Amino acid sequence: MSERGNRKTQVGVVVSDKMQKTVVVKVSHLVKHSEYNKYIKTSVKYKAHDETNTCKIGDRVQIIETRPLSKDKHWKVKQVLERTS
């Protein structure tokens, strides 16, 4: 009945898993500088909900935007793309 709009997805690397059911995911982007035409690497850290606590540091994960779960958490872990050994 109720449809959700297009939710954003991002791919990043887990940099912290010390919280309960929460991981910090670092997403990197290349942005072109408007004046110098040089590419600059930027990154953003998102707190994402990990219901099963399966993500470890170094894992590549896909996160999806969701309703606010707390003050800082607006993302959920959709799937783990690569695991670290």
Image (cartoon, rainbow, N blue to C red):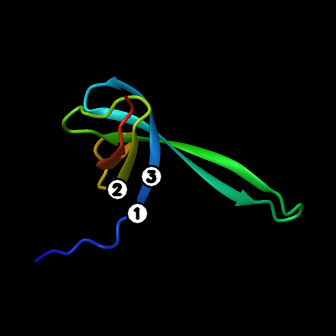
Which residue is nearer to you in this view: 82 or 24? 82
Which of the 4 quarters of the picture holds residue 34?
A: bottom right
Say what amino acid the circle numbered 2 marks: Ile
Give the residue at the far right of this rendering: 36
Figure check: 66 above or below 73:
below
Disc 3: CA contacts within 10 A as few (<14), some (14-19) or many (>=20):
some
Say what amino acid the circle numbered 1 marks: Lys
Q: Secondary structure at mark 2?
A: strand
Q: Which residue is mark 3?
A: 11
Q: Seen in the image, is 34 located left or right of residue 83?
A: right
Cα distance between the residues tagged 3 and 2: 9 Å
Which of the labelled discs sits on residue 64, or is there none?
2
Say what amino acid the circle numbered 3 marks: Val
Are the residues at dot 2 and dot 1 in contact (C-beta closer than 8 Å)? yes
Which of the labelled discs sits on residue 8, or is there none?
1
Are the residues at dot 3 and dot 2 in contact (C-beta closer than 8 Å)? no
Q: Secondary structure at mark 1?
A: loop
Q: Secondary structure at mark 3?
A: strand
Figure check: 85 above or below 2:
above
Cα distance between the residues tagged 2 and 1: 6 Å
Tell which tag, 3 or 2, sits nearer the viewer: 3
> Could you say where residue 54 lies in the image, as x and y percent from the top left?
25, 33
Disc 1: CA contacts within 10 A as few (<14), some (14-19) or many (>=20):
few
Residue in view at x 26 percent, y 39 percent: 50
Are the residues at dot 3 and dot 1 in contact (C-beta closer than 8 Å)? no
Give the residue at the far left of this rendering: 1
Residue in view at x 37 percent, y 28 percent: 85
> Could you say where residue 29 lies in the image, as x and y percent from the top left?
61, 53
Q: Seen in the image, is 72 located left or right of residue 40?
A: left
Q: Which label's residue is closer to the chain start, 3 or 2?
A: 3
